[in-house]
Image (cartoon, rainbow, N blue to C red):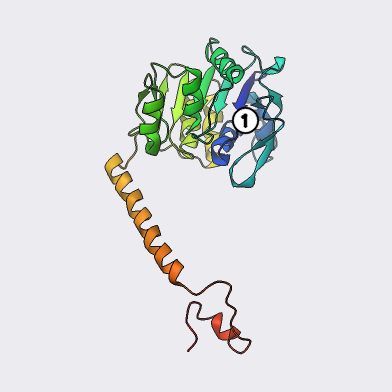
Amino acid sequence: MSKTIRIGVFIPHGAQTLDTACVDVLGVMSHEYLSAIPQLPAHVAALAPHVSVAYITTPTQGSDIPLTSGMTIRATHSYGDAEVAPGKLDVVLVPGPDPMLAFDDEGALAWLRAQAGVEGVDVLSICTGLFVCGAAGIADGKRASGPRGLQGMLKERFAKIELVGDEYRWVRDGNFWSSGGVTNGNDLMAAYARASQRWPQPVVEIGLQLTEVEERGQFYEQGKGKFMAGFAWQLLRAWIASLFSSNSPSASSQPSSSSRTGANHGKGLKAS
């Protein structure tokens, strides 16, 4: 198969590393990746399409895109480049940035709107990527997921989006796909690859087995009430732990040379 699937990962203001990394689920389903695995028969790679991935940002962001956990990736394009103009991509993936940022780069938002308006182009929003898509207006009137814990904030900002993120791990509405928080993006990638018909089904299933991405159900197994109660319990545990931590001896205190060996086996014990 000589067809090339052209994916643009759009990161105007930085993003979550794990959100961004989910594109690799699709990248594994490529002729380039599968042909490099000697254990696979040649006909598997021959069946797979070529996959190209562009990492697209804004002129003001510059070439180095900050991700979480101290990671930086190098942009391959700015949204104004002809190679990634509307009509040149098949898929636009929007990983989640800090939701507190203001998404007011009208050039970037106009680019995203134009991409979503091209027939045959799919937009995949991961986690807080929905804030970018909401600012661009491309999720207006559509069912969308987004992070479970931020449904209220999303509803306040984007009243025209039909939010279903309390129940749906991912959801599709036409050419717009969206997922809940962070690693739910992997589930969206699996569902998208299976449904999109861009990849032959054997290639999709082999790719998912190689990445060991098991598509979890579209609906959360745990209800919102239980999810929020569990989160609240962990907040309480953290508060209790912080009280004990604040009452512990100062980390700057150093044990005497005669007691250092014993301290390694009984940390937190006060000297008599």
- Give the class, few, some or many, for how many residues have Cα within 10 Å of label 1's Cα (few <14, many ≥20): some
Q: Residue at x 71, y 30 (%)?
A: 62
Q: State whether residue 218 appears in this view.
A: no
Q: Position of residue 114 (x, y in %)?
A: 56, 12
- Residue closer to the observer: 28 or 130: 130
Identify which residue is drawn at 67% across, 30% down: 61
Label 1: element kind: helix
Residue 16 lies, with reference to residue 111, above or below; the image says below
Q: Quadrant of residue 103?
A: top right
Q: In the rendered image of this protein, does residue 124 appear above or below residue 166?
A: above
Residue 218 falls left or right of residue 3: left
Residue 162 appears left or right of 21: left
Of 48 and 91, nearer the camera is: 91
Q: Position of residue 64 (x, y in %)?
A: 70, 35
Residue 14 in view (yes/no): yes
Q: Name the residue rendered at 57%, 21% in the picture.
A: 91
Q: Residue 139: x, y in percent?
A: 44, 19
Instruction: Residue at 38% x, 59% y: name it.
Output: 239
- Dot 1 corresponds to which residue? 44
Q: Is residue 17 left or right of residue 35?
A: left
Which percent across, then down, holds residue 161? 38, 21
Q: Quadrant of residue 115?
A: top right
Image quarter hosting the N terminus = top right
Circle 1: residue type: Val
- Tell me if 183 is positioned left or right of 87 in this view: left
| Placement of 115 over or under 56, stated as above or below | above
